[in-house]
Image (spheres, helix red, strand yellow):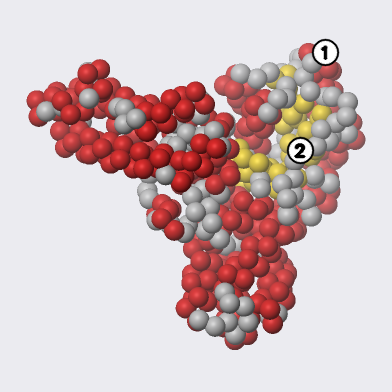
Amino acid sequence: MFENLSDKLQRVFKNLRGEGKLTPENMEAALREIRVALLEADVHFKVVKQFLEGVRQKAMGEEVLTALSPTQQVVKIVQEELVKLLGSHQSRLRFANEPPTMILIVGLQGSGKTTTTGKLARWLSRNGHLPLMVSVDVYRPAARAQLAVIARDIRLPIYEGAPEEKTPAELAKSARREAIQTGRDVVLVDTAGRLHIDEQLMTELQELKQLLSPSEILFVADAMTGQDAVKSADEFHKRLGITGAILTKMDGDARGGGALSIRHVTGQPLKFVGVGENFDALEPFHPDRVASRILGMGDVLSFIEKVEESIDQKNAEEMQRKLIDNEFTLEDFRDQLKQLKKLGPLDSILSMMPGVGPLKDLKNVKVDEKEIVRVVAIIDSMTPKERANHMIINGTRRRRIARGSGTTVQEVNQLLKQYAQARKMMKTFSGGFMGKRLGKLKLPAFGG
């Protein structure tokens, strides 16, 4: 997400650095370029106007224009204004004083409401809550069947309703009663959607709001629809009073204008973003981290949190010891790749790395997920002795490994070369400054 905007803004700052000295003239030229970049990223024109005004007022001050490093000051100002635009701080879910907390999931048909309900249930479950899902879409049996399938996949409970329960109100009330009886502390109510906003839909949602007094009314929108998502969010808010938004398919939207506009237009925060098809691919929205990503500074905190969630600490400590003692084998290499896959789509992981310094080219790396499957197959075709000591793998062994894994000798050779390079790099990484920093964080030195 935000790739296009990020590239353009970094180009603007590079041009400013090339000027040597900041003047009102080249600052105005930079602001014009920022304006074009934001509009091309599908940011709402009113949002662009307000954002540029905020940057202009701060950047045109004498203090910035005469500073020793004025461009860095401008980058700082742009970052501060981006954070303000995105919501200043992370907006957490609100929970009722008396459980169960009722959360209404609303939005247009096709926005990803039902899948998002499952993802949010999974996120709540992983963060110490006991969610119960219910679909109150009485018009589309397929929608209720879809949520039932999702509930089975993520192994979390769903209230499917009794045959006599025909209305959204009856289903929602019974789900709340079920939650109280079974000790569930959150009820996620997946509501009906339409292809467009109509009176019947809004009346139904208003009745549910009145009946349930939900702690949250979360509007789900497809990021790929850009300004249409912002417009729908605004209409839902005017009629229903949403408390926050969740943008789905952020991984497929290189522009990100919806995320930058939705809070400004509705006055309500963006609470989560969907970043993939996986049920784990739902992330809390952190304005400061997103601003850093847009400006090419990376999002190392989110990366660290993802690693902490996915990686076994004992395994990590053992791996660090092996790296330092030069005992890192092909079997360990294979296990590391499997652990890396647990972190989620690799493109998403690389997007968290800073776009500056030695890591600046990582964003251009195209990751072929099938390559990991191929590498694991090659290592699985080796004998335990070969995995423990790669030096014994001669020509005959390479041909046998290639046949057993359905690959070529060249691919086996390439893997062994990559392994040798990775081993060298990881030893440096684990023993150097970064290794010490990661050690303090109780994290693996490399994806393990």
Residue 410 appears in which quarter of the rendering?
Answer: top left
| Residue 49 versus residue 407 in the image, above or below | below
Considering every residue shown, the one lying at the far right of the view is 210
Viewer-nearest of discs 2 and 1: 2
Q: Secondary structure at mark 2?
A: loop
Q: Specify few, some or many for label 2: CA neighbours under 10 Å numbering under 14, 14-19, or 20 or more.
A: some
Alpha carbon distance from label 2 to label 1: 23 Å
Locate the C terminus and report the quarter of the image it occupies. Answer: top left
Relative to 422, is 266 on the left or the right?
right
Where residue 425 sits in the image (x, y, percent)? 34, 42
Relative to 299, is 430 on the left or the right?
left
Relative to 366, is 12 on the left or the right?
right
Q: Specify few, some or many for label 1: CA neighbours under 10 Å numbering under 14, 14-19, or 20 or more.
A: few
Q: Say what amino acid the circle numbered 1 marks.
A: Gln
Q: Residue 181 — which label?
A: 1
Where residue 138 sits in the image (x, y, percent)? 74, 28
Residue at the spot 75% in from the left edge and 41% down from the top edge:
92
Residue at the spot 57% in from the left edge and 31% down from the top edge:
309
Where residue 108 sits in the image (x, y, percent)? 69, 43
N-terminal-most mark, 2 or 1: 2
Where residue 331 sits in the image (x, y, percent)? 31, 24
Q: Say what amino acid the circle numbered 2 marks.
A: Leu
Whether residue 253 appears in this view of the structure is no
Residue at the spot 57% in from the left edge and 21% down from the top edge:
153
From the image, tell me which residue sits under label 2.
93
Considering every residue shown, the one lying at the far left of the view is 396
| Residue 341 versus residue 23 in the image, above or below | above
**Label pair 2/1, CB-CB below 8 angstroms:** no
